[in-house]
Amino acid sequence: MRGVAIVAMPCPVAYQGDTVSKLVKRSQRGHTIIPVTRRKTNILRSRLKVNSKALSYVEPVFRPPAEWRSLILQVTNGCSWNRCTFCEMYTSPQKAFRAKPLDELERELSALSLEGVEPPDRVFLADGDAMTLPAGQLKAICEMVRSAFPSVRRISSYCLPRNLQGKTVEQLAELKSLGLSVLYVGCESGDDQVLQLIEKGETFESSLEALRKIHSAGIKSSVMILNGLGGRGLSEQHAVNSARLMNAAQPNYLSTLVVSFPLGTSRFEENFAKMASTPFVELSQSELFLEMETLLSHLELERTIFRSDHASNYLVLKGVLQRDKAKLLHQVRAAIRDPSAAHLRPEWMRGL
């Protein structure tokens, strides 16, 4: 399929009455955008630096909200792991994992550079975990990007901790020298029991090892933790051990998203029913805030940019930890005491 990949997280939403400017702003906030007219699609391609004539995508394609103005280069399709029970992003048949051949990527970048598009300064390597590719292949991709667009100053990618097990700090540092600046690491939790129940294929230690390797290579890490992932029964240990992991790793960025189940909870609940002492019970809004209070209370970070402003979050939180810890805790506790006065995101505005 050929077409623009203007998406952020699952749950597509079409905004039929929006102007192009509003669509771009929604994309900035992390909303999934499906333009409904050819004119809006073409303008959005230009505004978001993507040209469908040169780049091919197997859709849907996902990227972090912060990469809203990056050129999306799909170097792999799907996720090499694709077993996490909470994730529906890569479960459709066309999203079976596959690496795009280097010669195909080279043709796409060459064609794009000749089409007169505005030279991008940022490139995001899609799909779910492009860092699973061998270090030599990633090096070749970064070199192709820099050759086609010398203007690029930042290359980023999703990364599973397991993607780095066979890569050395020296190899990662070489990729850093070629522009790889940010890795988005979905740790989801620092609690080994929760990680086992969701079939993440990671542990506290494997996540910490990967984050330390990223730091040693001089690459910035942006970590995601899922609020509510352990349900009611494992909420406290999920929050406490996630904070413990972040304290040990000291990531550059930390984001929290609320776990959501657009296709239902049956697949997710199955492991809890078989392996946990209590069944999975989804957290209420007030319980999500209590879990966030526990997480923030246990975080001891030196200089981490913290964001809880994704479209899935009821309560928008922004700050730098530790500097703003007291302020953020005050906001959460105020929302617990009186949700009606906390300027919460309405249910209809929430999404993945």
Image (spheres, rainbow, N blue to C red):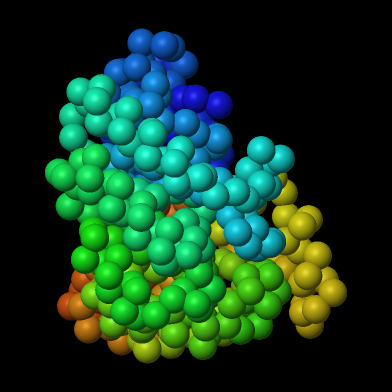
Indicate left or right for 155 with 150 as reference. Answer: right
Q: How many marks?
A: 0
Percent x, y of residue 66: 31, 50
Measuring 30% from the left and 47% from the top, which residue is drawn there?
A: 144
Query: Residue 150, relative to residue 25: is it above or below?
Result: below
For the residue pair 208 and 192, the one nearer the viewer reads as: 208
Residue 165 in view here: yes
Indicate left or right for 233 with 30 as reference. Answer: right
Give the image quarter of residue 250: bottom left
Residue farthest to the left, as pictured = 151
Percent x, y of residue 171: 34, 74
For the residue pair 153 and 42, the one nearer the viewer reads as: 153
Quarter of the image containing the N terminus?
top right
Measuring 39% from the left and 80% from the top, which residue is drawn there?
A: 168
Percent x, y of residue 53: 39, 21
Give the image quarter of residue 244: bottom left
Query: Residue 348, relative to residue 17: is it above or below?
Result: below
For the residue pair 88 and 72, the one nearer the viewer reads as: 72
